[in-house]
Amino acid sequence: MPETALSGYTLPVWVAAAARAALLQLQGEEFCSEQPLQLDQPQLQLVPVQAVAPLGQGRCLAMVCCEGGAALDLTRGLMIWVEARWGLPQAAGNWLQLEPGEGLGVYAESGDLCLSSYARQLLETNLQPLMPSGRSLVLRLTIPRGRALAERTSNAAFGVVQGLALIGSQAEVQQSAGPDALQAALAELRRRGALDGGCSELVLVLGENGLDLAQQMGIPAEKLLKVGNWIGPLLAAAAEAGVQRLLLFGYHGKLLKLAGGIFHTHHHLADGRSEVLTALAAIEGLAGEALKQLWQAPTVEQGMAQLELRDPEIAQRLRQSIVNRIESRCAAYLKETVGCNLKPGAALFNRSRQLWAVGPQAETWFPHFSS
């Protein structure tokens, strides 16, 4: 029997529930306010859907109201609309097409919908068994408040514009800043360490954007572990679990804190990015008005962009100095906390989702990041 959800779900789950309801309505089925979905558990989970309406001419619209649980305030009560219509006759297995409507995040460079592999897999798993043979389906996704809410996220830092991204990598919401997220990551690390052969190589990825990008770059999923802001304890736990090659992969504006010895990166607890950035820039020879402008820049991204125009040589040295410092501070942290000689690597990307700086340890151990 399906089980009713007891905790909050990520955006891809709500999209899948609305899409399933719309598809069934398109086929003439009666509306069901709870859609059984195959998520991350063997049992089907019931996910509520608010309404479904036929729009005529082979189109249907379903609406869901997100409940992200106590851990996620941003999407609580958020409405999502999914319009379903039949597409052209199926060709080469391309039976599902997705269109970004208002409030859905797209990549600024290509205009493509920002969608994780997990989100697409969730749709395919729950919709394909219901599809008539030879037919294709077009889903247009709309989040009416998505554009405004996206301004409260870091989407723009990763080149995602116009709305919220569907980049969840699991069904249930996790709070990256809370202790539950740390315990979940530690439990997963212990599980991997107990497998035959252990866990000799590990990539600690910061956030969903980093996880999505790492997968696109071809890093095997079994080497990836998404982490939140508890970087220090996870570094130590990885070393104690016998990890021999360890990489940190994340947005430069977040990992920059580690260069200053800040190993819990949530901005409510500690920041220091401007201080670290300008201190390292001064060591590289930046001075006077240029150093002041770097200090006053509202973001790391903007400060570095200005420096690139003013003095590209110092900017290049500063990027390398930052990633080198991150690697050395992480190695020192592990030496001090667990007494091991593990030297983690670090690879940083920018808002365009391109590699921004790669440390020498990262280049040596992980060919994906070699320059």
Image (spheres, rainbow, N blue to C red):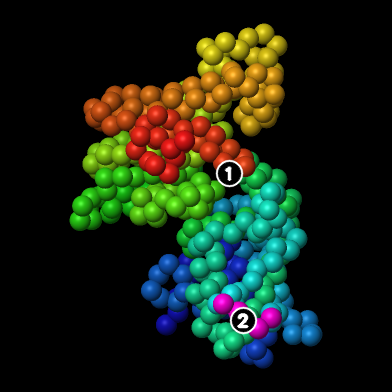
* Residue receiving disc 2: 90
- Exactly how many numbered labels are in the figure? 2
Task: Name which of mark 2 and mark 1 comes first in the sequence.
Answer: 2
Which is nearer the eye, 218 or 160? 218
Cα–Cα gap, marks 2 and 1:
33 Å
Q: x%, y% of residue 34?
A: 57, 78
Is residue 305 placed above or below 238 in the rendered structure?
above
The residue positioned 65% from the left and 25% from the top of the image is 308
Residue drawn at point x = 33 percent, y = 52 percent: 188
Q: At 53% across and 20% down in the image, what residue appears? A: 317
- Say which element carries label 1: loop
| 121 horizontally vs 140: left or right | left
Asked whether, in this view, residue 239 is left or right of residue 311, the answer is left
Asked if the magenta segment contains residue 91, the reply would be yes
Q: Nearer the viewer, mark 2 or mark 1?
A: 2
Image disc number at residue 353:
1
| Residue 331, x across and y down, in percent | 33, 27
> Residue placed farthest to the right in the image?
56
